[in-house]
Image (tube, rainbow, N blue to C red):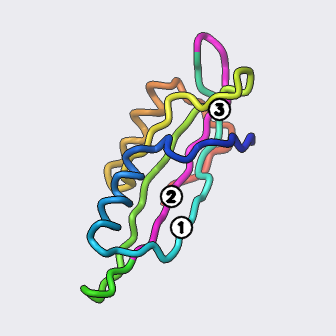
Amino acid sequence: MAEPSGYLGKFRALDDVIAFHKRRDWEETERQMIVVDYGVAKWSDRDVEANIIRAMVNVKNRTLGKYKEICFDLGYIWDQEFEMIRDPVAVSCVDGNIENWKNKQAFTSRWNVTLQ
């Protein structure tokens, strides 16, 4: 699996949720990124690599005395030929909308794991 550089800032929905929490005195305590699926998608009539990653961000609020886990599924196409990330998406794990992105991309898994 290729590890494209420059993915920071590509997943706006996740960035916005983290920023929202930081403005409300939540501090990030841990971030875990787990590859949950890998496969092929279509881009301009070409087969290109596609990845789905589960991002879990643990935060705490000292004032409230609470912890929270923020979970997003991140999908992106890695176009090796042009060295570009294509069609990145970040959706809440709760929503389960990563399946919509997979369908839109004609995603075919080459490494089938189960999201839990």
3 and 2 marks in contact (CB < 8 Å) = no
In front here: 2 or 15? 15
Q: Quadrant of residue 17?
A: bottom left
Closer to the chain start, of discs 1 and 3, is 1
- The type of residue carrying mark 1 is Arg
Q: In this view, does 75 lie above or below 70?
A: above
Residue topped by disc 3: 78
| Secondary element at image label 2 | strand
In front here: 115 or 65? 65
Q: What's the residue at 56%, 65% (across, down)?
A: 32
- The type of residue carrying mark 2 is Ala
| Secondary element at image label 3 | strand
Q: What's the residue at 27%, 87% (across, down)?
A: 63
Where in the figure is residue 21, as x and y percent of width and height?
Answer: 32, 66
Indicate yes or no whether the magenta region holds residue 51: yes
Q: How far apart are marks 2 and 1 (CA)?
A: 7 Å
Residue topped by disc 1: 31
| Secondary element at image label 1 | strand
Q: What's the residue at 46%, 44% (across, down)?
A: 11
- The type of residue carrying mark 3 is Trp
Mark 1 Cα-neighbour bin, 10 Å: few <14, some 14–19, many ≥20: few
In front here: 108 or 8? 8
Indicate yes or no whether the magenta region holds residue 53: yes
Where in the figure is residue 7, as x and y percent of width and height?
Answer: 59, 43
In front here: 93 or 68? 68
Q: In this view, does 86 lie above or below 96?
A: above
Where in the figure is residue 82, as x and y percent of width and height?
Answer: 70, 21
The magenta span reads 44-59
Residue topped by disc 2: 55
Q: Distance between the residues labelled 1 and 3?
A: 22 Å
2 and 1 marks in contact (CB < 8 Å) = yes
